[in-house]
């Protein structure tokens, strides 16, 4: 199907006044390119958008370009392919590797959730269906085209892109799109942190006419990492009570930093040496990719840089099978359990939460952003009980959070990155943020940089 369009337009199909579902559709001279293809997560009203008819026929999209492999940026790909998208999917090699983990895993979780809903009858739909299947995810993977950093590649007629390191996740990138006889557009993706372990700092921003930048933490600065002391205190307190420390963590990105800190605190003798379990097959596989692509990590993590190169702690074990996971869930011995998903929306961590939340000896620690409507946000907001697998689970465990491990730039780091732009963009669009933080960042940018940022709404189209 050929779609003719003379002017360049950008439609915001996700991450507009919310932190999830990143999708930006570029129409230029008869060509359609989708930048990011994420799932909506969190509030039910947002999740329902995943089931809506896509804004344009999937077959009319010439290519998809990805910034990184988190589900809110790639998780809709199998659905798009199932609806008829047959073009190439362009991303860095690191993102390609991680998509091979997250997309089939997402499909399996959705199929299992549908199975559980049908088995226990807690869905309003009969039968409950998954958004997509593992077959759809596998098909999407065959359409991926890995690309190198800092090399221009034409992804569709009249649209050339270049990937620049973003420091947010293995393989993460800003994408600079150059349009023939049109503007340059910088898709910021998720902006990484400065001076954090594991990954290098974000690259400086290149000149661009239009810039999209995230605003997840646009109203605050992260806690200082205090050399891991708060993390150490939480581990010591939980061990002293003989409890378990359950850490819902994004299977790619956050697990690596958690293991870095546990290993470092063990080496400094700041914490007791406890068994450390990674109960996520995807996280275990992701660790292999991080190790294999060590040249993309911080210098201290590279071969020959010392014993911090390995992610293994003194009593480290990955949990492979569901049977092993059930055994670990039933074990009451003090331990650190890192399991997905990071917002406690699905996956094996739910079984650990069912077992751990009723016991005040245990601690549940959140180390990443918790979107509105997720179990993680409800727990942080002080819920006395949460619904898991169709039943209410009482909350008596300690609920803690550490913001310093966030992989998203805070307001100071966003401003620092914007300051690397060689010149002010003609248009700056704030995306990937809830209204409060987004509006706070808009005011800060207006005050300090004297720019006029714009906050697009869902499905809004702007002319570039």
Image: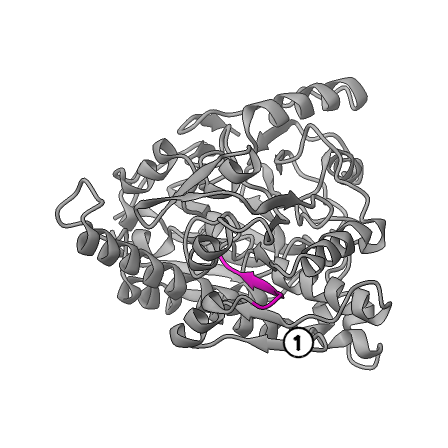
Magenta stretch, residue numbers: 333-340
Please indicate whether residue 291 sits to the left or right of residue 118 in the image.
right
Judge left or right: residue 96 versus residue 46.
right
Any magenta on residue 410? no
Residue at the image point whose x is 49% and y is 31% from the top: 16
> Callout 1: few (<14), some (14-19), or many (20+) C-alpha neighbours within 10 Å?
some
Query: Picture coordinates of residue 407 (x, y %)?
Result: 66, 50
Residue 244 seen from this side:
yes
Badge count:
1
Magenta stretch contains residue 337: yes
Circle 1 SS class:
helix
Horizontal arrangement in the rendering, residue 125 relative to residue 220 (left or right): left
The residue drawn where x is 63% and y is 27% is 437
- Pick the front one: 406 or 320: 320
- Residue 436's place in the image compared with 265, above or below, is above
Quick check: can you spot residue 84? Answer: no
User: What residue is drawn where x is 82% and y is 44%?
Assistant: 224
Image quadrant in which you'd find residue 51: top left
Q: Where is residue 275 in the image (x, y as percent from the top left)?
A: 64, 72
**Quarter of the figure with residue 132:** bottom left
Residue highlighted by disc 1: 291
Image quadrant of residue 114? Answer: bottom left
Q: Where's residue 426, x and y in %?
A: 66, 27
Question: In the picture shown, does residue 413 fall above or below 322?
Answer: above
């Amino acid at each position: 199907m050929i779609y003719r369009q003379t002017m360049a337009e950008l439609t915001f199909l996700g991450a507009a006044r919310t932190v999830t579902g990143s999708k930006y559709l570029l129409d230029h001279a008869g060509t359609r390119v989708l930048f990011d293809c994420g799932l909506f997560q969190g509030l039910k009203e947002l999740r329902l958008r995943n089931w809506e008819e896509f804004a344009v026929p999937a077959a009319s999209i010439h290519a998809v370009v990805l910034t990184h492999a988190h589900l809110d940026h790639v998780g809709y790909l199998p659905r798009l392919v199932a609806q008829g998208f047959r073009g190439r999917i362009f991303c860095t090699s690191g993102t390609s590797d991680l998509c091979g983990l997250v997309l089939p895993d997402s499909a399996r979780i959705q199929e299992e959730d549908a199975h559980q809903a049908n088995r226990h009858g807690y869905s309003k739909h009969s039968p409950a269906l998954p958004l997509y299947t593992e077959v759809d995810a596998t098909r999407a993977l065959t359409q991926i085209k890995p690309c190198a950093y800092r090399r221009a590649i034409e992804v569709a007629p009249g649209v050339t892109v270049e990937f620049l390191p973003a420091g947010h996740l293995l393989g993460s990138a800003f994408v600079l799109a150059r349009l023939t006889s049109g503007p340059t557009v910088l898709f910021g993706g998720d902006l990484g942190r400065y001076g954090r372990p594991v990954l290098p700092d974000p690259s400086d921003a290149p000149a661009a006419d239009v810039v999209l930048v995230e605003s997840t933490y646009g109203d605050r600065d992260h806690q200082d990492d205090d050399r891991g002391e708060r993390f150490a205190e939480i581990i010591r307190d939980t061990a002293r009570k003989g409890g378990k420390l359950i850490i819902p963590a994004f299977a790619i990105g956050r697990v690596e930093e958690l293991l870095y800190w546990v290993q470092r605190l063990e080496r400094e003798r700041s914490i007791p040496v406890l068994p450390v379990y990674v109960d996520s097959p995807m996280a275990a596989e992701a660790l292999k990719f991080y190790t294999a692509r060590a040249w993309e990590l911080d210098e201290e993590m590279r071969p020959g840089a010392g014993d911090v190169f390995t992610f293994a702690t003194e009593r480290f074990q990955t949990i492979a099978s569901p049977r092993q996971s059930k055994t670990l869930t039933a074990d009451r011995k003090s331990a650190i359990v890192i399991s997905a998903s990071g917002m406690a929306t699905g996956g094996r961590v739910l079984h650990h939460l069912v077992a751990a939340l009723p016991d005040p000896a245990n601690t549940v620690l959140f180390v990443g952003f918790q979107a509105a409507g997720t179990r993680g946000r409800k727990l942080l907001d002080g819920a006395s009980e949460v619904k898991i697998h169709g039943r209410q689970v009482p909350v008596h465990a300690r609920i803690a959070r550490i913001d310093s491990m966030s992989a998203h730039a805070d307001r100071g780091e966003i401003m620092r990155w914007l300051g690397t732009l060689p010149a002010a963009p003609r248009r700056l669009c704030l995306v990937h943020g809830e209204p409060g933080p987004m509006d706070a960042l808009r005011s800060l940018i207006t005050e300090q940089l004297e720019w006029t940022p714009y906050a697009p709404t869902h499905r809004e189209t702007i002319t570039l």
